[in-house]
Amino acid sequence: MVHAPNPHHNHETLVLKSAIYSRILLLTLIIFFRTLLSPYDTSASLNPPCLTTTTAAANDTRRSPIASAIENGIVWDSVYFVRVAECGYEYEQSYAFLPFLPLTISFLSPSTLFSFLPQRSLFALSAYVINNLVFVLAALYFYRLSIAILKDPEIALRATVLFCFNPASIFYSSIYSESLYAVLSLGGLYYFLSGKNNLSVLLLALSGCARSNGVLNAGYICFQTMHRAYHALFQNKNVTLALQIVFVGALRSACIFAPFVAFQAYGYYNMCVGRFPDEIRPWCNARVPLLYNYIQSHYWGVGFLTYFQLKQLPNFLLASPILSLAFFSVVHYAKSRPQIFFSLGFDTTIEEKSRGVVFLSEDHSRFKATDSVEKSSVRAEEHFNVRRRKNVIKEDVSNVPIESEPAAGQGYLSASVLPFVLHLGFMASTAFLVMHVQVATRFLSASPPLYWFASYIMTYPAKYHRWGYLVWAYSAAYILLGSLLFSNFYPFT
């Protein structure tokens, strides 16, 4: 008996190829532009000894051509990540860079295989290898998460390929924490939908140890808890069950916050405890001593509307494409599904509730079904094709749904997408109003609705085809621009 090929398996193969080819492309561009141009800032190779020199590696001065080439890639925030891996947290401002990436590269550096390299070069090489390999796994999780949410293999595949070539790609192939954050957050959300709550909470908690915005992933837990508690209290009339749901949700959310809070406590202990009065930093005496907030405000001038200056207009222009895409993603969803959006998902149709809408139904935690999603998608496609053939036979061309948008309960416009859209809206608002706006390109780059919406508008060329081409052009331009500027120590997002 001959078995038909599994389209899901074929798609995953394409996803893996796209992810691998995109990393090869980025690394090739980095090497090419670094060879072609001289760096704007030549301080990348500087490496003063650690303040607490406990090993010979701290003063290792071996400078082979290979080591020099690798260390020239330690630019911008990479300097801090490699320094922390090598020397620990020496300075107050270094606590702005969370420990998961430095710990990962220090533990996984293959010193026995590359003993001819100095420690700093070895850490940098390890970071490059880890981040590029991890990105491939992140792309796979992105596809599986997209399948689970959108229930449309074609749109999920297109969105994943766009993620593989996203505008912030240079950071996913450099010594930054974007790749680790992406694999932890996307993997955590995928397992959350699969009902593997303990593994999900662990990964989402670690995402908050890779990037500070990882703690916002607790919002997904809170969203589900809110809906399940409402269902238990007002539909099942079970107060005890509602309280249990709230308690469990609060406990899981606390676990996601725990690593970030523990790191702040670690910083407080190192910087404030046992110090002489004249050494005490201002934030140590605050009612809630948050080191991370103080560093962002004091050293980088991050604050509400503080970046709204005329001289920062070029940075707003640099961030305008990603912010515009985020804005239209949220607005289009809100205009298409106003009842669900403005009711925070409480006003859903009976059909959607019966299908087990993600986060909204009581029994969706038992979701296992990438395969079942695939089967339902195939059945839906077969039904679509049958209706299309019937319409063609009847010569009723006006009813042939070749480029028509899907029903509101499917794809990007389904209720399942709502928590992701809300998460994106909050992050985009924060990037625009509070942060250095140019970092919005990489800050939002791991947010699935951006790619779901872009894939959605590319699917219906009669209505949106120009915007689809524009999204691809934007991604290609920023990949080239980022590879050229960032790798040569020029400012870029």
Image (cartoon, rainbow, N blue to C red):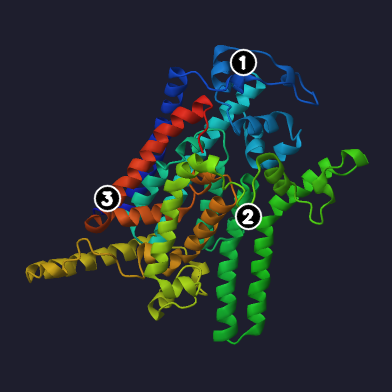
- 1 vs 3, front mark: 3
Which quadrant of the rendered structure holds the N terminus?
bottom left
Residue 448 in which image quadrant:
bottom left
Quarter assignment of residue 396: bottom left
N-terminal of the pair, mark 1 or mark 3, is 1
Which residue in the rendered view is the most extreme toward the bottom? Answer: 237
Q: Residue at x 38, y 35 (%)?
A: 21
In the rendering, at what x and y percent does residue 17 appear? 37, 39
* Within-10-Å neighbours for mark 1: few <14, some 14–19, many 20+: some
Q: Is residue 8 left or right of residue 438?
A: left
Tell me the residue that label 1 is attached to.
116
SS under mark 2: helix
Q: Position of residue 184 (x, y in %)?
A: 56, 49
The residue that appears at 86% across and 42% down in the rendered structure is: 280
**Residue that badge 3 annotates:** 466
Which residue type does callout 2 highlight? Answer: Val
Which amino acid, mark 3?
Arg
Instruction: Name which residue lies at 69% across and 39% down.
Output: 299
Alpha-carbon distance for marks 2 and 3?
36 Å
Q: Quadrant of residue 77?
A: top right
Which disc is residue 215 wearing?
Answer: 2
Q: What residue type is disc 1 on? A: Phe
